[in-house]
Image (cartoon, grey):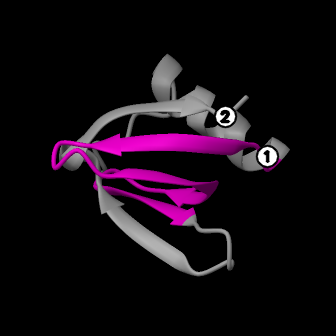
Amino acid sequence: MSDFDTSLPSVRQIQTYITEKKEVELKLITNDLHVGKVFWQDPNCICLLDQYDLPIIIWRQAIVYLKPKN
């Protein structure tokens, strides 16, 4: 059984960003800032498509925050 709990508000919110193809800012513990659209998520990672539609796979534990871009 997977430990990916789709009833969590954070998981549902990220899923909304995926469905709406919303652009987000994702800050990492390394202080890097990535901007793009969330393509998919799983229990360990989030895949972000950058401005060139290239995938960036980011480990969840490396994320400081994820927010919609204005």
The residue that label 1 is drawn on is: 19
Which residue extends farthest right? 20
Q: How many other residues sit within 10 Å of disc 1, few (<14), some (14-19) or many (≥20)?
A: few
**Which secondary structure class fits the magenta region best?**
strand
Counting from the top left corner in percent of width and height, residue 61 is at: 18, 44
Counting from the top left corner in percent of width and height, residue 19 is at: 79, 46
Determine which quarter of the picture holds residue 53: bottom right
Magenta region: which residues?
Answer: 21-48
Counting from the top left corner in percent of width and height, residue 60 is at: 28, 47
- Which amino acid type is shown beneath numbered disc 2? Lys
Q: Is residue 60 magenta?
A: no
Residue drawn at point x = 59 percent, y = 81 percent: 54
- Vertical comparison of 36 with 23: above or below: below
- Vertical comparison of 54 with 43: above or below: below
The residue that label 2 is drawn on is: 69
Q: Which one is in front in this view, the residue at disc 1 or the one at disc 2?
A: 2
- Which amino acid type is shown beneath numbered disc 1? Thr
Q: Earlier in the sequence, mark 1 or mark 2?
A: 1
Question: With 24 as the anchor, is 59 left or right in this view?
Answer: left
Q: Nearer the viewer, residue 14 or 3?
A: 14
Determine which quarter of the picture holds residue 38: bottom right
Counting from the top left corner in percent of width and height, residue 45 is at: 34, 58
